[in-house]
Image (spheres, rainbow, N blue to C red):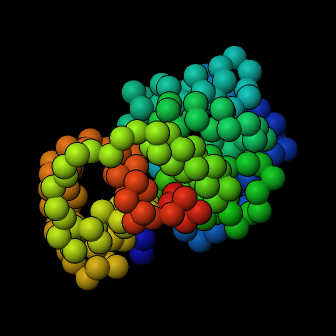
Amino acid sequence: MEPKIRVLIADDHAVLRAGLRMLLDAEPDIEVVGEAQDGLEALARVRDLAPDVLLLDLAMPRMGGLEALGRIRDVSPRTRVLILTMHEDEEYLREALRAGSAGYILKRAAAEELLSAIRAVYHGGVYLHPEHARRLLEEMVDREARRPEPETEPPLSPREREVLRLIALGYTNQQAADALYLSVKTVETYRARLMTKLGLHSRAELVRYALQRGWIRPEETVCS
């Protein structure tokens, strides 16, 4: 059997925590291993429990979610953080992503969306609501449109372009390997080769590269 996804819930509203626990514990592949009512307690619980996924609210007493998020990596590097908040302001979204969040979902989201988000970040992906993803990509496209195209660039083989496109669309190495009928090791080799060949250093730069060349579109869901 696959191990269950161990989730810690950090929110200052007890009723919401109870509802989330009931929802998550009803899933056969998820278990709630603990709760926290503020940022400081969340840090302590993450240190003790090392959950797979931390559901983290932004507005909490003693220490807010963004400040706690900045410290999570030091406390438990393997814990993936999914922001669960009522804040729809995109600036909060940007701050959360810069601080290391693996996803951002609103409290008004449907239960199925939350469950999908938890599973996505657990398996190494990044989750954003499609509308948030579209807006961020449009901003990225606008910024890149103002940059001059490089004078020369190395040619890519058809397979390299396929791998780059899937990575840009948010596929994990395993998902890309399954889609292309390759081994994970081969995909990892292609990914490293692309980074070196194109002089890129992150998936975000690969996304920009693919967008500039029209290999993906801003409206495509790239993070779920």
Q: Is residue 187 above or below residue 69?
A: below
Q: How many marks?
A: 0
**From this viewpoint, is residue 58 visible?**
yes
Q: Position of residue 160 (x, y in %)?
A: 21, 67
* Residue projecting furthest to the top: 62
What is the x, y in percent for residue 198? 20, 49
The residue under the point 59% across, 63% down is: 219
Taking the spot 69% from the left edge, 17% from the top edge, the residue there is 62
Foreground pick, 167 / 1: 167
Q: Quadrant of residue 42?
A: top right
Image quarter in which the C terminus is found = bottom right
Question: In this orientation, does residue 140 appear?
Answer: no
- Residue that extends furthest to the bottom in the rendered view of this protein: 181
> Which residue appears at 40% of the width and 39% of the height?
147
Side of 71 where 215 appears, left or right: left
190 up-or-down from 180: above or below? above
Residue 127 position in % (x across, y down): 55, 55
> Quadrant where the N terminus lies?
bottom left
Front position in the image: 185 or 207: 207
Q: Looking at this view, is 198 or 101 the one in front?
A: 198
Q: Residue at x 64, y 68 (%)?
A: 27
Left or right, 155 with reference to 222: left
Tell me: residue 119, above or below residue 201.
below
Residue 129 in the figure: left or right of residue 88? left
Observer-nearest of 23 and 83: 83
Q: Position of residue 16 (x, y in %)?
A: 81, 46
